[in-house]
Image (cartoon, helix red, strand yellow):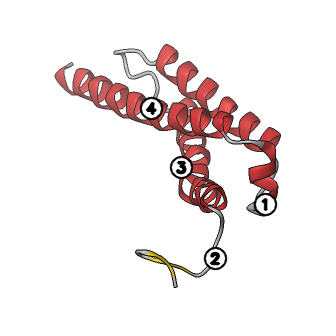
Amino acid sequence: MIILLLQYALTGLLGLVALGIQLWALADCLRATPADFERAYKRTKQFWSLLTGGSVLVGVLYLLTLSPRGGGMGFTLLLDLAAATAAAVYLADVRPALAQVRRGGNRNQGPYGPW
């Protein structure tokens, strides 16, 4: 019984961490303009908004279906991992490209300004 409670606590904690990542990705995606995505040569804002929004939905559903009797370790865990991976791809690939576009791209900038 104690092992099941530890498993429940650990999967719940990891689910909350994943949900935080998913919410961060969605919030960042919604702040960007559609033109930023085009200038960064990434998929459209609508695509990433739907992907990160769906990721948040899956994360919330995962936490709602989690139960102390071992629930949340089957297919729902796999879906939540896929959703967290989609959000992580946005944060690791698209977000830095958008940040570079917002800064003005690569205009021969050194660490202390143009050179």
Q: Amino acid at mark 3?
A: Ala
Q: Are marks 3 and 2 in contact (CB under 8 Å)?
A: no
Q: SS for tag 2?
A: loop
Q: Is residue 39 above or below residue 112?
A: above
**Percent of width and height locating residue 3:** 21, 27
Measuring 50% from the left and 14% from the top, which residue is drawn there?
64
Q: Which residue is disc 1 drawn over?
A: 39
Mark 3 and mark 4: Cα distance apart in space: 11 Å
User: Which badge, 2 or 4, comes first in the chain's sequence?
Assistant: 4
Whether residue 71 appears in this view of the structure is: yes
Which of pointers 3 and 2 indicates the residue nearer the eye? 2
Q: Are marks 3 and 4 in contact (CB under 8 Å)?
A: no
Q: Is residue 106 above or below residue 26?
A: below
Q: Is residue 38 above or below residue 14?
A: below
Which of pointers 1 and 2 indicates the residue nearer the eye? 2
Labelled disc at residue 107: 2
Labelled disc at residue 88: 3
Measuring 21% from the left and 19% from the top, which residue is drawn there?
1
User: Which badge, 1 or 4, comes first in the chain's sequence?
Assistant: 4
User: Which badge, 3 or 4, comes first in the chain's sequence?
Assistant: 4
Q: Is residue 102 above or below residue 74?
A: below
Which of pointers 1 and 4 indicates the residue nearer the eye? 1
Q: Residues within 10 Å of mark 2 (few under 14, many from 20)?
A: few
Measuring 67% from the left and 34% from the top, which residue is drawn there?
30
**Percent of width and height locating residue 55:** 62, 34
Q: Amino acid at mark 2?
A: Arg
**Percent of width and height locating residue 54:** 69, 31
Q: SS for tag 4?
A: helix
Mark 1 and mark 2: Cα distance apart in space: 14 Å
User: Which badge, 1 or 2, comes first in the chain's sequence?
Assistant: 1
